[in-house]
Image (cartoon, helix red, strand yellow):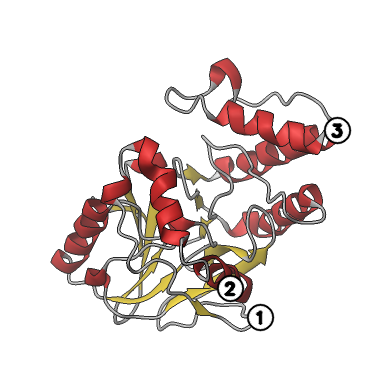
Amino acid sequence: MLRQIAEGVLIHVSEFLLSNAVVVRGRDGVLLIDPGVQGHEMACLANDLSTAGHTVVAGFSTHPHWDHLLWDARFGDVPRYGTARCAESVRDQLSDPNAKADIAEHLAPTGIADQVPLDLLGLITALPDGTARVPWDGPEVRIIEHQAHAPGHAALLVEDSGVLVAGDMLSDVLIPMLDMSTADPIEDYLEALRLLEAVAGDVSAVVPGHGSVGEDDRVKARIELDRAYVLALRDGAEPSDPRIGPSAEPGWEWVSDVHSGQAQRLA
């Protein structure tokens, strides 16, 4: 079910990893960001939009991970944007003829493999390098590109409403997950946090890719929490972070394993 979080901005939450789809209302339709995971959830979202009289006129994928690259035909055949680096990464992934089968195999233990529609996976339109705003007829949506978490990762700032769509950052349940394929994943992440901090004064709500919406003072608090975690990794220290260990949210205990893996790779 769609829920409004600010004027002109709504979210739809998937069961899988509390994945957030974001809808931004424009003049003639809506911008749909990271539309969801399971087919029945995207169908629900499409029905909600149709009932409200909204037509999808553009999409956006914040980064090139499979759960942010999905689509449903009921959203329409419209441009689905991503940064140039994001689109390049997606092309590289899909050049492997086994890419979709590998995703399905990865999902098999979750029990939702047959619920995730992969036929329209990753049909991303690359924006030119340096594009500052999403090209659509609606509120100004600023693109904040960085290299934390994934190539060409982008946060989006809906300027009129002060909503920051953070992609897979600034979550209350997931720790920072670094892109270990880069030359300096620690500095990449710290630089991304600096970019987000630079706009935090204009932000009234942050929507992470997974987890709950953070409002007002929680925006800067999440930036500080993520920074403290990354600095602890850099310094080889054990982070004091509520998202791992005994204080982790029920059902999210596996995040501690993600932390252990990152710490070992950086040691």
Mark 1 sits on what residue?
Answer: 129
Q: Which mark is residue 137?
A: none
Q: Check if mark 3's residue and mark 1's residue have beta carbons within 8 Å.
A: no
Mark closer to the chain start, 3 or 1: 1
Q: Which image quadrant: the C terminus? A: top right
Q: Is residue 56 visible?
A: yes
Say what secondary structure mark 3 lies in: helix
Residue at figure coordinates x 47%, y 25% from the top left: 249
Mark 2 secondary-structure assignment:
loop
Of 57 and 219, nearer the camera is 57
> The disc labelled 3 sits on which kind of residue?
Asp
Q: Is residue 244 left or right of residue 253?
A: right
Q: Label 1 neighbourhood size at 10 Å, few (<14), some (14-19), many (20+)?
A: few
**Residue 18 visible somewhere in the drawing:** no
Cα separation, mark 2 vs mark 3, equals: 32 Å
Is the residue marked by circle 3 packed among few (<14), some (14-19), or many (20+) residues within 10 Å? few
Q: Position of residue 203 (x, y in %)?
A: 56, 56
Check if mark 2's residue and mark 1's residue have beta carbons within 8 Å: yes
Residue that mark 2 sits on: 83
Estimate the spatial distance between the alpha carbons at disc 3 and disc 1, rounded to whole Å: 34 Å
Decide which of tag 2 and tag 3 comes sooner along the chain: 2
Task: Please state which amino acid type lies under the numbered disc 2.
Answer: Thr
- Is 225 situated left or right of 248 in this image? right
Q: Is residue 100 left or right of residue 51?
A: right
Secondary structure of the residue carrying numbered label 1: loop
248 lies above or below 68: above
Q: Report which quarter residue 265 is drawn in.
A: top right
Q: Along the polypeptide, which appears first: circle 2 or circle 1?
A: 2
- Tell me where residue 77 appears, x and y as whole percent: 30, 80
- Can you say whether 243 is above or below 143 in the image? above
What numbered label is drawn on residue 235? 3
